Amino acid sequence: MLDKKIINYILEELHGGQSDLEILPEDDLLGSGLVESMGMMRLIQFVEEDNGIKIPPQDMTIENFMTVAAMVDYIERTKNNG
């Protein structure tokens, strides 16, 4: 469910609701060009606001944000440790 919210945000806010675009949780967002650097900053802000968490700069890594699945794992780890 969390992955769908993130994917919907990317489609609606970063791609203007492009209906022909499909994003899977395992897709490399940065490498594929689905999300560029400014879009990633907006996406991180959305993740923080939507999940009530603050992502410290040291956690803003490729490993945590390369795919939607990685973001979901990061959010769940952060919420469980918070």
Image (cartoon, grey):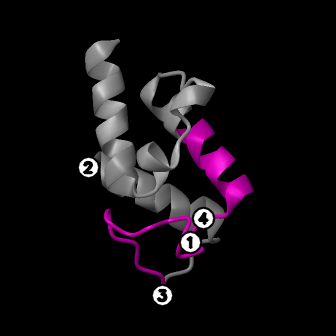
Tell me which label, 3 or 4, sits earlier in the chain. Answer: 3
**Circles 1 and 4: CB atoms closer than 8 Å:** yes
Mark 1 or mark 2: name the one nearer the start of the chain. 2
Query: Are the residues at dot 4 and dot 2 in contact (C-beta closer than 8 Å)?
Result: no
Secondary structure mostly seen in the magenta stretch: loop
Instruction: Measure the alpha-carbon separation of dots 3 and 2.
Output: 21 Å
The numbered disc on residue 1 is: 2
* Residue 22, image x, y percentages: 41, 79
Instruction: Count residues near mark 4 (Cα–Cα under 10 Å), then give few for <14, some for 14-19, many for 20+.
Output: many
Q: Which label belongs to residue 34?
A: 1
Please tell me whether residue 72 is drawn above or below residue 35 in the rendered image. above
- Residue neighbourhood size for the residue with mark 3, other residues' Cα within 10 Å, grouped as few (<14), some (14–19), many (≥20): few
Locate the C terminus by quadrant. top left
- Residue type pointed to by label 2: Met
Label 2 neighbour load within 10 Å: few <14, some 14-19, many 20+: few
For label 4, the residue is 35
**Foreground disc of the pair 1, 2:** 1
Q: Which mark is residue 20?
A: 3
Residue at image point 36% right, 24% down: 78
Q: Are marks 1 and 3 in contact (CB under 8 Å)?
A: no
In the rendered image, residue 61 lying in the magenta stretch gets the answer no
Horizontal relation, residue 57 to residue 4: left or right: right
Q: Residue at x 56, y 79 (%)?
A: 18
- Return the x and y of residue 34 as percentages of the image width and height: 56, 71
Q: Residues within 10 Å of mark 1 (few under 14, many from 20)?
A: some
Secondary structure beneath dot 3 equals loop
Mark 1 vs mark 3, foreground winner is 1
Is residue 45 inside the magenta stretch?
Answer: yes
Dot 4 amino acid type? Val
64 in relation to 37, above or below = above
Farthest bottom residue in view: 20
